[in-house]
Image (spheres, grey):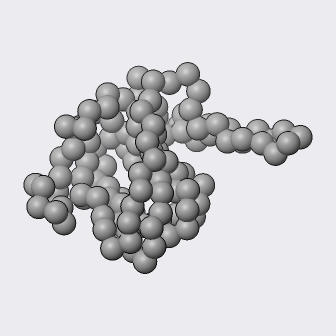
Amino acid sequence: MQLSPKELQEITTVEKPWGGFIQYVLNQPVTVKILEIRAGEQVSYQYHHQRSELWIPLDEGACLKLDGTIQRPKPMEPVFIPQGAKHQLIGESKDYRILEISFGHFDEEDIVRLSDKYGRI
């Protein structure tokens, strides 16, 4: 089951006496990873046929390219990567981590690389 951008807009923030939580996904099949991006490095500029992704920066310094546009989201500012959208994480001046939630069929082989610093095309 694919999560649509409309459903992603339903990200829920719940306040509790002890603080609170942000609920990104409810009752959906997903794959969750924490990506560690080193300063000066980058993932391939790529897209996926079978999945969409939600990226949530955990640290300062996140930089990404989405369909040719550079963005620098703040920590905890979610960025939705639709299925088929070209995307890349870029390490600028500092290391950072991204919480990645993948929706749809997850397969590490479902990576179409458009450019790659490490020659993996």
Q: Nearer the viewer, residue 106 or 34?
A: 34
Q: Image point 31% across, 68% down: which residue? A: 41
Quarter of the figure with the C terminus: bottom left
The quarter holding residue 31 reads: top left
Q: Nearer the viewer, residue 27 or 34?
A: 34
Q: Quadrant of the N terminus?
A: top left
Q: Residue at x 78, y 42 (%)?
A: 20
The picture places residue 50, in percent across and down from the top left corner, at 28, 33
Q: How many marks?
A: 0
Counting from the top left corner in percent of width and height, residue 118 is at 16, 63
Check the image and name the residue furthest to the bottom. Answer: 93
**x and y percent of residue 17 in the render?**
89, 40
| Residue found at x 44% / y 29% | 30
Side (left or right) of 99 relative to 15: left
Where is residue 52 drawn, in percent x and y? 37, 39
Name the quadrant containing residue 109.
Answer: top left
Q: Is residue 103 above or below residue 45?
A: above
Left or right: 23 in relation to 61: right
Residue 9 visible? The answer is yes
Answer yes or no: is residue 80 visible: no
Query: For the point 38% across and 71% down, which residue is it?
Result: 39
The answer to which image quadrant residue 16 occupies is top right
